[in-house]
């Protein structure tokens, strides 16, 4: 039965993606375009050369961080919808450090990344503390904190660290930029950090006792409490760690790609991360894979529009359909009637064997 559950967790997202692409193809066909040719442009835009693959990975990098943020907290049964705010706060803290401290080179990068991670952890701890001490809804608090972080960032790049007449901050020093792997494959090493966190998160959740206890709290906090688990401590821990991951992601995005803060920095990454985590069934490694698929859609959208005169909204529709089908499929499999059906099928198969 466990094997069937694991297969279902893989099959549901795959089928969701395939069905979304089929429906997207029908929409493209209704526009009078060849869907096969359109998807050819889409994938060539993402995989047409080593440079395009690198650009796709750069797009995927922040999505991996924010999806891990959502996946880790959801495994503990709490809903951290503040990934975007924690992402932004990490970047804001890092830009303050690199522009004011004067520390450069690799030590400057490492300290800045650490500061971004700690800042994200502190920002993430706020809804956790309010939940365990005052019983406030963590979803509402974390969403509101997204707006606070965005407005504070706006204050920073329009006043405190404004670069002349342009509403943006000063660029970080060249020596504090995260290096790319190679000139022919210009993806910064931040992608390595993101992938390492994905595998580390998977190992922690599924191969350590602390990870088991965290998942137990997520499955049934009441039962975990009566079995002696410090439920509130694990809830706060999940918020702190997920916030730290998001803050680190914001710092990596600043040092690896954006190089300065301006309007739109980090916009949408938090909620995209939630969608990616849900599609991946809250699996950290699966989150990294789905984040890459989302990046493929985003990178190929411009090539699709240029080559076929198809609006980029088609890609948004496909992305939305993937989310809808994945969530609906998962909910369907969790219905008691569906579980009973699969149990009967398993018993029937064992009886015939």
Image (spheres, rainbow, N blue to C red):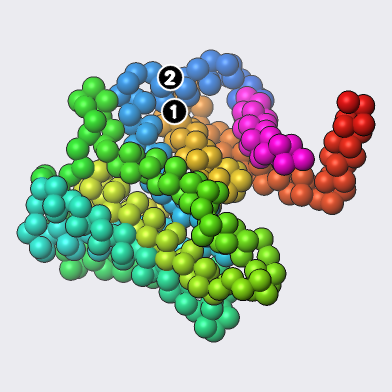
Q: How far from the left and from the top, in percent, is residue 79?
A: 56, 63
**Residue drawn at 20 percent across, 25 percent down:** 183
Q: Secondary structure at mark 2?
A: helix
Please identify the quadrant where the N terminus is shown.
top right
Position of 208 relative to 159 (above/below): above
Tell me the crowding category of disc 2: few under 14, some 14 to 19, or many 20 or more residues within 10 angstroms, Cα based: some
Q: Which mark is residue 300?
A: 1
Q: Provide the residue designation for mark 2.
A: 44
* Quadrant holding the C terminus: top right
Q: Give yes or no for contact between labels 2 and 1 (Cβ–Cβ under 8 Å).
A: yes
Secondary structure under the numbered disc 1 in the rendered image: helix
Task: Depth check: give the residue in front, 175 or 84.
Answer: 175
Q: Is residue 70 visible in this depiction of the protein?
A: no
Does the magenta-highlighted stretch encompass residue 235? no
Few, some or many C-alpha atoms within 10 Å of disc 1 (few <14, some 14-19, many ≥20)? many
Q: Residue at x 23, y 22 (%)?
A: 184
168 vs 139: above or below: above
Residue 13, numbered label: none
Residue 49 showing in the rendered view: yes
Report x, y in % for residue 290: 52, 38
Name the residue at the left extreme. 102
Q: In terms of secondary structure, what is the magenta stretch mainly?
A: helix
Extreme residue toward the bottom, this view? 134
Q: Which residue does the image show at 92% across and 31% down from the upper left?
A: 351
Residue drawn 24% across the image and 30% down it: 181
Instruction: Choose between 201 and 28: the one closer to the eye.
Output: 201
The residue range painted magenta reads: 1-25
Residue 35 placement, left or right of 69: right
**Which of these two is toward me, 292 or 339?**
339
The picture places residue 168, in percent across and down from the top left corner, at: 21, 56
On screen, residue 203 above or below 164:
above
Q: Is residue 255 above or below residue 301?
A: below
């Amino acid at each position: 039965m466990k094997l069937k559950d694991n297969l279902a967790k893989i099959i549901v997202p795959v089928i969701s993606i395939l069905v979304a692409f089929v429906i997207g193809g029908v929409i493209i066909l209704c526009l009078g375009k060849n869907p096969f040719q359109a998807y050819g442009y889409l994938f060539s835009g993402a995989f047409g050369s080593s440079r395009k693959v690198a650009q796709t990975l750069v797009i995927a990098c922040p999505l991996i961080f924010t999806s891990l943020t959502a996946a880790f907290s959801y495994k503990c049964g709490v809903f951290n919808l503040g990934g975007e705010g924690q992402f932004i706060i990490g970047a804001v803290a890092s830009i303050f450090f690199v522009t004011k401290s004067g520390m450069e080179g690799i030590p400057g990068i490492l300290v800045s990344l650490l500061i971004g991670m700690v800042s994200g952890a502190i920002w993430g701890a706020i809804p956790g503390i309010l939940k365990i001490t005052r019983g406030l809804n963590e979803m509402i608090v974390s969403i509101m904190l997204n707006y606070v972080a965005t407005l504070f960032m706006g204050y920073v790049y329009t006043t405190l660290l404004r670069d002349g007449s342009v509403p943006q901050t000063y660029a970080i020093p060249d020596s504090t930029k995260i290096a790319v792997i190679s000139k022919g494959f210009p993806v910064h090493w931040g992608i390595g950090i993101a992938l390492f966190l994905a595998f580390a998160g998977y190992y922690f959740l599924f191969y350590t006792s602390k990870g088991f206890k965290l998942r137990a709290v997520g499955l049934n906090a009441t039962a975990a409490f009566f079995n002696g688990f410090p439920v509130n401590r694990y809830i706060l821990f999940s918020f702190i760690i997920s916030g730290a991951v998001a803050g680190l992601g914001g710092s990596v995005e600043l040092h690896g790609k954006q190089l300065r803060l301006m309007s739109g920095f980090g916009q949408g990454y938090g909620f995209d991360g939630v969608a990616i985590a849900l599609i991946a069934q809250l699996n950290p490694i699966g989150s990294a894979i789905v984040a890459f698929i989302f990046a493929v859609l985003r990178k190929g959208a411009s090539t699709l529009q240029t080559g076929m005169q198809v609006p980029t909204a088609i890609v948004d529709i496909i992305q939305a359909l993937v989310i809808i089908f994945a969530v609906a499929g998962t909910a369907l499999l969790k219905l008691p009637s569906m579980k009973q059906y699969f149990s009967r099928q398993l018993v029937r198969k064992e009886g015939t064997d």
